[in-house]
Image: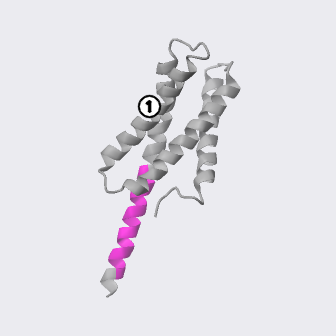
Amino acid sequence: MPLIHKKNFVPTICIVYTFLSMGKLVIEKAANYTDPYYTENLLTMLVITILATFVLSLHYFIQNVPIIFVVLGQYGILLAIIMGSIWIESYFININSSAYRDMFYSFTIPYIIAAAVYYVLFFIQVKKTNEMINEIKSRR
């Protein structure tokens, strides 16, 4: 059974987005930084959260692929989408010279943490399921 499915997709997005927003606010307050693009950054964070949650939820459907390829593939796909959107955006607005680097760090660090939590929970669920199966087999 997948960890992220139809019934908990939106609540998962809401929880992750709340953690990311609060983390952003705490870090900015600690650094005494005022974000001039506050609204745009929060909306971008929401879109990336939705995309990342969707891509992580696809893990259940590609379980027969080695986990390292799945993790790297998911990360690569999301990073390509994000960098591609910055590239497209650069044709319409002026972007900072460090936009790609900043977005790389802003995406990579939270994604590694979120993916680690997801896969740890996934393997805990697999272990519990295997224990239940072994218990059922031993009762026969």
Residue in the picture at 40% in, 67% down: 128
Q: Is residue 7 left or right of residue 80?
A: right
Overall secondary structure of the magenta stretch?
Answer: helix
Q: Tally the marks.
A: 1
Q: Along the line of sight, which residue is nearer the eye, 87 or 119?
A: 87
Quick check: is 79 in the magenta stretch? Answer: no
Kind of residue at disc 1: Ala
- Is residue 37 in view from this perspective? yes
Residue in the picture at 47% in, 38% down: 111
Position of 106 relative to 72 (above/below): above
Name the residue carrying label 1. Answer: 80
Quadrant assignment, res 71: top left
Q: Along the line of sight, which residue is nearer the eye, 125 or 72?
A: 72
Measured as percent of width and height from the top left, residue 108 is found at: 46, 32
- Is residue 105 in view from this perspective? no
Position of 80 relative to 66 (above/below): above
Residue in the picture at 47% in, 60% down: 2
Measured as percent of width and height from the top left, residue 50 is found at: 57, 43
**The residue stretch that appears in magenta:** 119-136
Measured as percent of width and height from the top left, residue 28 is found at: 63, 24
Q: Along the line of sight, which residue is nearer the eye, 83 or 26?
A: 83
- Which type of secondary structure does the marked residue at label 1 adopt? helix
Q: Quadrant of the C terminus?
A: bottom left
Measured as percent of width and height from the top left, residue 136 is found at: 36, 81
Quick check: is 121 in the magenta stretch? Answer: yes
Position of 28 relative to 130 (above/below): above
Q: Residues within 10 Å of mark 1 (few under 14, many from 20)?
A: few
